[in-house]
Image: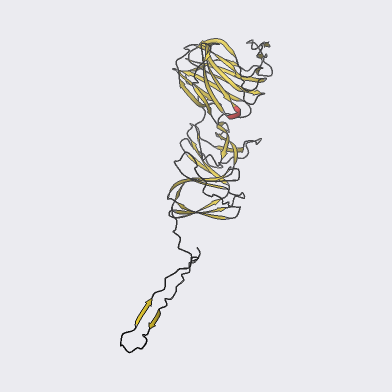
Amino acid sequence: MKNIHWISAAAAVLVLAGLACGGGDGETPTVIVEEPPTTIPTNTPQPQPQPEGTTLEITNNSGVAVWYVYISPADADEWGEDWLGDEMIDPGETHTIVGIPEGTYDVKAADENNETIQVTWEAKVEGDMTWDITGLSSFEVVNNSDDAIYYLYIALSDAATWGEDWLGDQVIEPGASFVVDGVPRGTYDIKAAEDDDSSVEIVYNISLPEKNNWTVVGKTPLPGNAVLRFEEAFEDNRNNWGLDTETENVFYMSPAGGEYCMLIKSDNFTAWEWYEPFRTDEFVAEVGCYFEGAEDATCGLGFGPDGDNIYWYEVSPSDQTFALFLLENGSWQENLIDWTVSRNISPSGANYLSMERLEGVVSLYVNGVLIGQVNSDRFPEGRVGLGGSTYSEGNTTVCLDNLRVWRLE
């Protein structure tokens, strides 16, 4: 703080004496005393009021210039205003923010492009605080699955392999949690695995440090009364799939190389083929699916009595979303589940879509993880359809593999 120098001026007294001419009348002389005006130089610094609240001293050791700092109440839905204003914190520099009301906050530093550098969650702010920005993040893994987690892999989303385990000798038992520290900022795929290295659950495209926890729910086991009634690996065509049938909009190819593919030639078009052997009310159906062509195409799995009446479940890998549609009497109805993000959807490669119908509840799974449910008593009997959809572009090849259908008895 700059020192304030007070300037003091001594008051002068001016005395004027008036003497009468001839001076012989004996009157007392008149004395006039004047006080000069008190003046303070206009350039004298004045004391400044000190801001109320706490101070936050920020040291930037991240190696990236900090352009924005957001300090938002921990229960807020949005980050709110930037606290740096026109300031910037270069690497190695320190900056102090003042006047923060005491409370519990989430604090975020961001770079020139407003990309997150580091986040501190639920920080109790009081008195004089310091924050060291390293660019490293931490997040909590909460195990709500039925399986102990022995291995945790955190790999950049564009990496070719999972890399090293991050748990070491630690085991996350069901109901327990574990905090992972020192993860550089980036976009990651994260895998939790059992002691035999089989997957408990995988999530994709997780932005760290934006994400501060991951609750592992694990894969849902089949109901105890599930009986496998049909399995198709598409190694041959004994079930007469496709038969190289071609229409104006779709070319249904015969199975080859262990997969069954259909070329959807038109845009904004949905195509499927029925699994015919039986009609059932309560069932579980699962199929692996990927596609080549338009980025916004989808894989689909459905259930209904005929081509005018069907529940239609779609997975869109490009934006990791899913939806559940309803076709009734030839017209698409209001969506049963609108497009919803699920990080369990792989944005590249194959996804396994599963649909379960049990006691009037339609449940949707991707890669074994429950992602959506809806109560609906339509179509008490039906059959399973599998295929895909196009949107902005046509000429997309949807390929399916490992179809399995269980009856719930």
Residue 181 seen:
no
The percent coordinates of residue 97 (x first, y second) are 50, 53
- Colour scheme of this structure image? secondary structure
The residue lying furthest to the left in this view is 26
The answer to whether any part of residue 353 appears in the image is yes
Nearer to me, 264 or 43: 43
Looking at this view, is 266 or 324 the one in front? 266
Determine whether, in the image, residue 226 is placed left or right of residue 292: left
Note whether 291 is above or below 37 in the view shown: above
Left/right of residue 407 with respect to residue 36 in the rendered view: right
Locate residue 125 relative to residue 118 in the image: left or right.
left
Seen in the picture, residue 319 relative to 402 is either above or below; the reply is below
Q: State which quadrant residue 234 falls in.
A: top right
Q: Position of residue 282 (x, y in %)?
A: 48, 15
Return the residue found at the far front: 22
* 320 and 33: which is toward the camera: 33
Q: Is residue 324 above or below residue 87?
A: above
Q: Name the spot of residue 66 as percent of width and height, x first.
A: 58, 49
Residue 83 position within the rendered picture, expressed as x and y whole percent measured from the top left: 51, 48
Relative to 18, residue 331 above or below: above
Quick one: 1 or 145, which is closer to the camera? 1
Number of marks in the rendered image: 0
